[in-house]
Amino acid sequence: MSKTQSITIPDEVVMSKMYIIRNQKIMLDEDLAELYGVETRRLNEQVRRNKDRFPEDFMFQLDETEFSDLKSQNATSSWGGRRKLPNAFTEHGVLMLSSVLNSKQAIKVNIQIMRIYTRIREMLLKHKDIFIKVEQFEKQMMKQDEKIELLFNYLSKFIEKDEQPRTRIGFRTEKEE
């Protein structure tokens, strides 16, 4: 393979490196570095040199709990050798990376990532009505569950009363007295 030819990365591989943290879709610095074909420290070096381009809504550093949760969620210890907590890049941060990384592969992968983000957003908007209906259905089911529970509570009270001996009323024969 020549130097001008770039590696094609399947969309599934890129999508597997997207996580949701702090209610945002993010990608980690080491995953992006791997996709771009650069070392993680080089990627972070470029980010540090261009700090003004990466406000907190573009990039933030994971805290210990988030990092630990992410590692356990992925059941991997491959991140164990890090000295610093990883940087997390939001969609805008990934887009900004293209302005600080100039390799052809980085630009190509960045375009691919942006297309994937767009497809995800379109898919969510396209199926928004389904999400709303599922939410409404879940609320109805919760109400039904409450009604069923109330019904069972009433039934259990009737069953408890049936177990107690009843006093007989009405006419009795001489043998029964």
Image (tube, rainbow, N blue to C red):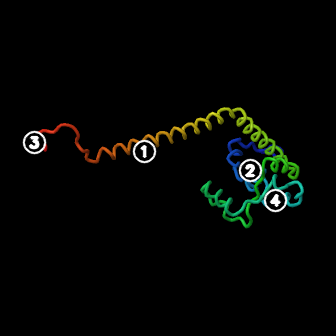
Question: Are dots 2 and 3 in contact, CB under 8 Å?
Answer: no
Task: Write the residue at 78% across / 41% down.
Answer: 112
- In three-dimensional space, the C-alpha distance between marks 3 and 4, rounded to whole angstroms, equals 99 Å
Pointer 1: what residue? 153
Q: Which of the two marks, 2 or 3, is nearer to us in this view?
A: 3
In primary-sequence order, the first of circles 4 and 1 is: 4
Tell me which amino acid carries mark 4. Asn
In primary-sequence order, the first of circles 2 and 1 is: 2
Pointer 4: what residue? 44
Pointer 2: what residue? 26
Q: Which of the two marks, 3 or 1, is nearer to us in this view?
A: 3
Task: Write the residue at 73% across / 43% down.
Answer: 9
Question: Are dots 2 and 1 in contact, CB under 8 Å?
Answer: no
Task: Write the residue at 58% across / 35% down.
Answer: 137
Number of other residues with Cα within 10 Å of mark 1, as a class: few under 14, some 14 to 19, many 20 or more: few
Name the spot of residue 32 as percent of width and height, x first: 76, 52
Q: Which of the two marks, 4 or 2, is nearer to us in this view?
A: 2
Tell me which amino acid carries mark 1. Asn
Mark seen at residue 175: 3
Q: Residue furthest bottom?
A: 83
Say what secondary structure mark 3 lies in. loop
Say what secondary structure mark 2 lies in. strand
